[in-house]
Amino acid sequence: MKDYKLILAVLTVAIVWGTTFLAIRVAVETIPAWFVAGIRQFLAALIMFLVLVSRKEFKWIGWKNLGYQIIFASLMLVVANGMTTVAEETVSSSLASLISACSPILVFLGSLAVGLQKFSFRALAGVMLCFSGILFIFWDGLQDLANPQYRMGMIFLFCAIAGWASGTIFTKKLNIQSGNITLNLFYQFLFAGVVQVIFAFIFSDHYNFGNWTLKSISAMLYLAVFGSVAAFFAFHYALTKISPVQVSILAYVNTVIAIFLGWLIMDEKISLKFILAAVMIICGVFIINYKPEMFRKQKVAEGGA
């Protein structure tokens, strides 16, 4: 019998996370990026708080655990999510999604450095293929880096994937137990929201709230409700049913969806060279992460969402 909840969860993660790059691009058209990121996290924290209160699970997590959540939120939400949002003020959603797909390269290299990963020629081949894809993108576009706004956008993107990779390695290295995931996420979202809104008032040249369009506000609300909350719950439900390695395959689907939507809705130019670079990067990331159990059928795990 088919597990329709699992199918829905997998589709939610693949499609929603594939649309977040487009939603960010739409949101930052009239709303300063740090406001988009900060308000998104605040709204997500509010939703998590309401869920926790309804379940009577809201409580203080202790200073030690709070410290872990702050570090994790700083890397994954403030740096990775926040700087991706800032980058999309000057970089297309397609390019942002493709560069973000390279984060497993840094995870692999960082894991090698701290002893979490063993060297293998297969993984090295994957890294080289990814780097080749990145060079392929910029081979004809080096002149674009002369534009200071575009150049800063690219710097922010690479800072973002470095933050995501560092957060991933931090979690693996400390082997942090998830505990009440919703509770931890509430503190992460709340901390990130506070920091990013402060950044918004400091770094935004103009934040005339009257100029914010309904289209951009709707995209920001979509990011909070679906990108941060719905997809997160779906992701963790999927983890109770199939292996983490199998769930990780969704990352490749996200990138393809993001590139397609950027072309379809935002009229972003997708050249043959860009498509070839995308294929090289996705194949490289797949080679790095490949494990035989990716395609084996898994027994349904007990427990639940």
Image (cartoon, rainbow, N blue to C red):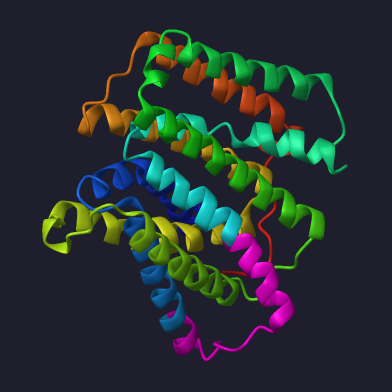
Where residue 275 appears, as percent x and y from the top left, is 42, 16
Location of residue 187 with respect to 207 vertically, above or below? below
Magenta extent = 51-73
Whether residue 260 is visible to the viewer of this picture, yes or no, is yes
User: What residue is shown at x 35% (from left), y 35% (from top)?
Assistant: 93
Q: Is residue 169 left or right of residue 10?
A: right
Whether residue 40 is visible to the viewer of this picture, yes or no, is no
Q: Is residue 296 left or right of residue 233?
A: right
Q: Is residue 283 left or right of residue 173?
A: left
Residue 224's quadrant in the figure? bottom left
User: What residue is shown at x 66% (from left), y 31% (from top)?
Assistant: 105
**Which image quadrant: the C terminus?**
bottom right
Give the number of marks.
0
Where residue 9 appears, as percent x and y from the top left, is 47, 55
Residue 65 painted magenta: yes
Residue 118's quadrant in the figure? top right
Q: Is residue 125 left or right of residue 273?
A: right
Residue 16 painted magenta: no
User: What residue is shown at x 41% (from left), y 83% (from top)?
Assistant: 50
Residues 147 and 27: in front is: 147
Where residue 135 appears, as percent x and y from the top left, is 54, 14
Where residue 69 appears, as percent x and y from the top left, is 64, 69
The secondary structure that dominates the magenta segment is helix
User: What residue is shown at x 41% (from left), y 51% (from top)?
Assistant: 12
